[in-house]
Image (cartoon, grey):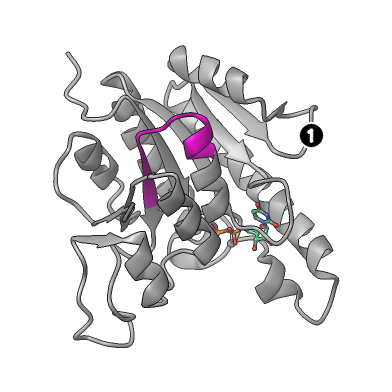
Amino acid sequence: MSTAKYKRVLIKISGEALAGGKGSGLDFEVLSRLSGVIKKCVDIGVQVGIVVGGGNIWRGVKDGAGKIDRARSDHMGMLGTAINALALADVLEQHDLDVRVQTAIEMSAFAEPYIRLKAISHLNKGRVVVFGCGTGSPYMSTDTAAVLRAVEINAEIILFAKNIDGVYDSDPAKNPEAKRYDRITFDEILEKHLGVMDSTAASMANDNNMPMLVFGVKTPETILEAIKGEKVGTLVVSSR
Ligand code: UDP
């Protein structure tokens, strides 16, 4: 019998998280641990969609500013997310999961195009769906894509895997006194300019009443704990 609190979740994994300690590229140890946990989630009956970031490969603004056009640089960033989606799909399959990659930009030789009802149908069949290419539009982030896909597929919560284990009032790497929140609203994140996610993602999640749990990917087992309803990381909720 399922011990899960949620029936359908959307996991957001940043590219940086997929790079592990290396900062860029892919850390297959991280991918493997993550996949092992996702397998356990699926085995207890949870439907899992995943939005992957691409910052381990290319960030539109950070890497391209002043060198190439912003929109083109963002196109490159979206291609980075597709690379991550394919890598993660493969490692998930190595963990005996049935996986489909759907991309917001068509690349039909190796991924399905994003089709909402098809994604939902895959989830209902117990398949993991990995969403690549973010929203498919430049000037957006994969955080926003995560909120968009979560709302579209009627996920109950976004599990936001970061390189940091929750939302802090200041950067714990710089301030040893930094305090971690157990719970915070999207409005507070926006008001206090906490850099945990971009403002488009925060306001979209707020407007659509989509809760988000921010936790550290270094302990991917947290995903399972969160799914079982245990108190981990920081819960971000709408103030509506
Ligand atoms: N990107 C984009 N539109 C989207 C999602 C992503 O243009 O809907 C581009 C953007 O250039 C971004 C890059 O892809 O910098 C990688 O995504 P993101 O920075 O969100 O990845 P993460 O920080 O989660 O690894």
Could one spot residue 201 in this view of the protein? Answer: yes
Q: Quadrant of residue 210?
A: top left
- Look at 69% across and 72% down and name the residue there: 61
Q: Report which quarter residue 73 is drawn in.
A: bottom right
- The quadrant of the image that shows the N terminus is top left
Let me know if residue 98 appears in the view. Answer: no
Q: Is residue 38 magenta?
A: no
Q: Nearer the viewer, residue 167 or 95?
A: 167
16 or 114: nearer the eye? 114
Q: Residue at x 50, y 59 (%)?
A: 19
Q: Which residue is mark 1?
A: 107
Residue 178 placement (x, y as % from top left): 23, 81
Dividing the picture into quadrants, the one containing residue 42 is top left
Task: Tell me where residue 111 appears, x and y as whole percent.
Answer: 70, 29
Ligand number 1: quarter of image: bottom right
**159 magenta-colored:** yes
Q: Is residue 42 positioned above or below 58 on the image?
A: above
**Left or right side of 69 for 117:** left
- Which residue: 22% across, 86% down? 176
